[in-house]
Image: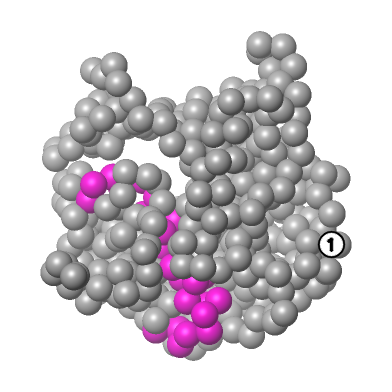
Amino acid sequence: MKLKTNCKYSLVVPTSMGVRITPLNGQPVHASDTFKMQATSAETNVASVSSYLGLPVKVLTTFVKGSPVAQFIKSNLKARHMEYEGPEVDQGDPWGYRHQFNIADSGYGTRGPRVHNDRAGEIGRTLNVKDFDLERIFGQEGVQIVHLSGLIGALSEESSKFCLELARAAKKHGTRISFDLNYRASFWKGREKELRETFTEIASASDVLIGNEEDFQLCLGIKGPEAGGKDIEAEIDGFKQMIGRVKEAFPNASVFATTLREVVNVNEHLWGAITLAGDHWEVIKPRSIHILDRIGGGDGFVGGLLYGILKDWEPQKWAQFGWATGALATTFETDYGQPADEDMVWSIWHGNARVKR
């Protein structure tokens, strides 16, 4: 995939920042009285792979003016080596705007994780194209890839329009577009027709399309894979056929990707991936990985995939690196992996967990 050169930013992500509060030691929320708070969003989870490995990343978001949580988030983004841009919006009264809360435990063994999203008054719902100079960002500063997520695309009418205008501006200026569909039924309720049209236009302009069978079916109306039962070969073949249908419906895209996951228990998953780049298939059959916290593994895969594209590697390495950065993310308490260097990631791919001195 040919990328623009002489750009200020390798990767730009629009997002709605929030915080996750997690009980210690894998305990469930209802049985805990001590919690750890961290800044989080799916889109910055993706961007963290590139930012930790030295590529210039920018976050487009919005903040609650004067909020200590907003200050906490800004400090976290700086610590992740990310620039950010966005308006400061007054909270209003005590029932006004705030950054969303994600209340989640990690689960343990046979007790699965439970996640409760509290998004009332979420400031990210106000994301508006009028608050950003897209001509400057894409035309003057330059961006190689903009990564869009269906979470932001469906968050509100304003955020939907924002993502659509970002895609249009990126297309105009030769920036490549990555789109992770990320379907959420609660976001789509009552907006199905509007969001189907918006997602279809964004997907039609995209160069990289990412999603699972539910995403492609419910966001874009693509027939999903036939049930493969316990036969992994049949399951993979079904996914490849589905990706073929997506490619036929959206011929502008040249890269398609999906992950494969089977949960053995909370702390062991079988983790795989399928990518199609041009006519090159890369199939990574599910391999056992050990899980500290599963949240962010899929975002980690996307982050590694995009990093490989940005580094101009061959497509085989995109998928391998993405598989490994996804696995890496699940070994961190944060929702994102923090690779020290590329070698840490490739050691995971090669199954080398020996001490490095």
Q: Residue at x 30, y 60 (%)?
A: 327
Image location of residue 44, percent across then percent down: 53, 51
Residue highlighted by disc 1: 136
For the rendered model, the colour scheme is one colour
Seen in the image, is 46 located left or right of residue 21? right
Which quadrant, please, contains the N terminus? bottom right
Q: Residue furthest top?
A: 94
Above-or-below relation of 153 to 63: below
In terms of depth relative to the viewer, which is nearer, 198 or 44? 44
Image location of residue 255, percent across then percent down: 53, 76
Answer left or right for 357 relative to 225: left
Q: Position of residue 8 (x, y in %)?
A: 70, 69
Which residues lie in the magenta part?
291-316
Q: Quadrant of residue 100?
A: top right
Inspect the magenta stretch and tell me whether residue 284 lies in it.
no
Direction from residue 334 to residue 277 in the image, left or right: right
Quadrant where the C terminus is found in the figure: bottom left
What residue appears at the point 48 percent right and 57 percent down from the top-left corner?
A: 48
Crowdedness near tag 1: few (<14), some (14–19) or many (≥20) residues, C-alpha within 10 Å: few
303, above or below 160, in the image: below
Name the residue at 69% across, 39% down: 62
Is residue 311 inside the magenta stretch? yes
Secondary element under disc 1, as helix, strand or loop, is: helix
- Give the farthest residue toward the front: 357
